[in-house]
DNA sequence: CAAAAGTTGTTCCAAACGGAACAATCTGTC
DNA sequence: GACAGATTGTTCCGTTTGGAACAACTTTTG
């Protein structure tokens, strides 16, 4: 049996673009998180938590859940692990007894910077075949799509 | 606590584009497969198997694994389920005792068409904010990236 | 042609995942 | 101000996941 062209299958399906985005995500980006897990002992949800807190000084778990669109229990688990290993601080919200305010620790930020550099490297590999103009186009389009998707029902 | 703009976090990270692709995939596309599971009793890996066989008349499990970049044991599981429910046929390869040749049944193809229409609808919702020119750009860029990624080590 | 190396498909297992139910707390309404 | 309804964070639990080992078979090498 001759091996079919491993990419031509993408060309004829109707939902080509979303399939390709899934493909790139699952086949190329997700494995990078697996490598990160081995090297830093941090899984994807945990890194995303640190990432959110590296960009917003204070967040509740619920806000992280909304930002990342991940289920709340996943965030909850990640918070506990990151507290245990000292990458996160948590303080009760004086204005709302239900929620707690999360902040990243200096150690957490250092780890975040290392992992984010790793991810930036990987992205560079992925985008390598694109011209500068194409990169601009892609960036602009994905920005538009993300804003739109954030408002879309799951 | 004021809710931060749920999309602005994307703008400042270094690996913006790959994060956004992951976000679109996991926050918008994956939930569609969850809906498909409820409506058709088929999980993502199983649909991808049918999709491959809807585009290539005969494939081995290993070829499906390479096309989709999913682990072989996931494909193996999917093959068994699809055989059980009659969406797939399997015949031993006369030329190679290790592998089996898979083909989609008419029922499998009918199911595939229904699911693929659903996914096409969902993609349309996702791409709604884009102009025709942007869609062309995105399509071209993702095509380029997928071909490139298929050659990239995981 | 025998032994080593590689490939295919499968099973096993530990980890990750997410929906659902839950207790604690807050908000709105009468 | 009490009570219904919403929200937050957590625990529970069944399902999904993918790495690793494995048996069957094929290919390569000396």
Image: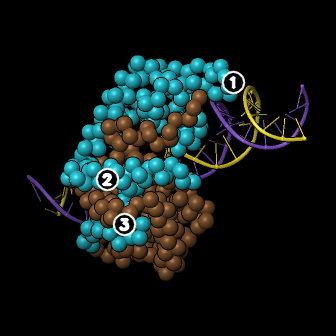
Chain colours: A cyan, B brown, C yellow, D purple
Give the chain letter at badge 2: A
Give the residue displayed 34% in from the left and 32% down from the top. A115
Seen from the viewer's position, the closer of residues C11 and A121 is A121
Residue A67 image offset from top left, x and y in percent: 51, 40
> Tag 1 or tag 2, which sits nearer the N-term?
1
Q: What distance separates the C-alpha of mark 2 from that of mark 1?
A: 43 Å
Q: Which residue is mark 3?
A: B132
Mark 3 neighbour class, 10 Å CA radius: few under 14, some 14 to 19, many 20 or more: few
Give the residue displayed 49% in from the left and 75% down from the top. B113
Mark 1 neighbour class, 10 Å CA radius: few under 14, some 14 to 19, many 20 or more: few
Q: Quadrant of the N terminus of chain B?
A: top right
Q: What distance separates the C-alpha of mark 3 from that of mark 1?
A: 49 Å
Q: Which mark is residue B119?
A: none
The quarter holding residue A110 reads top left
Q: In the rendered view, would you say B108 is above or below A126?
A: below
Describe the element under mark 1 as helix, strand or loop: loop
Give the residue displayed 38% in from the left and 51% down from the top. A142
Q: In the rendered view, would you say B57 is above or below B17?
A: below
Q: What distance separates the C-alpha of mark 3 from that of mark 2?
A: 14 Å
Q: Which residue is mark 2?
A: A138
Mark 2 neighbour class, 10 Å CA radius: few under 14, some 14 to 19, many 20 or more: many
Q: Which residue is mark 1?
A: A97
Residue B106 image offset from top left, x and y in percent: 49, 81
Give the chain letter at badge 3: B
Outermost residue to the bottom = B106
Q: In the rendered view, would you say B9 is above or below D29?
A: above
Q: In the rendered view, would you say A123 is above or below B66?
A: above
Number of the front mark, 3 or 2: 3
């Amino acid at each position: 049996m001759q091996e079919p062209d491993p990419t031509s299958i993408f060309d004829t399906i109707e939902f080509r673009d979303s399939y390709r985005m899934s493909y790139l995500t699952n086949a190329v980006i997700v494995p990078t998180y697996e490598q990160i897990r081995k090297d830093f002992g941090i899984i994807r949800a945990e890194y995303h938590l640190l990432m959110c807190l590296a960009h917003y000084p204070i967040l509740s778990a619920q806000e992280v859940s909304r930002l990342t669109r991940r289920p709340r229990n996943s965030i909850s688990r990640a918070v506990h692990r990151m507290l245990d290993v000292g990458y996160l601080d948590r303080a009760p919200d004086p204005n709302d007894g239900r929620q707690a305010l999360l902040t990243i620790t200096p150690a957490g930020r250092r780890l975040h910077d290392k992992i984010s550099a790793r991810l930036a490297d990987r992205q560079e590999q992925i985008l390598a075949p694109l011209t500068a103009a194409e990169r601009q186009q892609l960036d602009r389009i994905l920005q538009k799509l993300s804003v739109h998707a954030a408002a879309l029902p799951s």
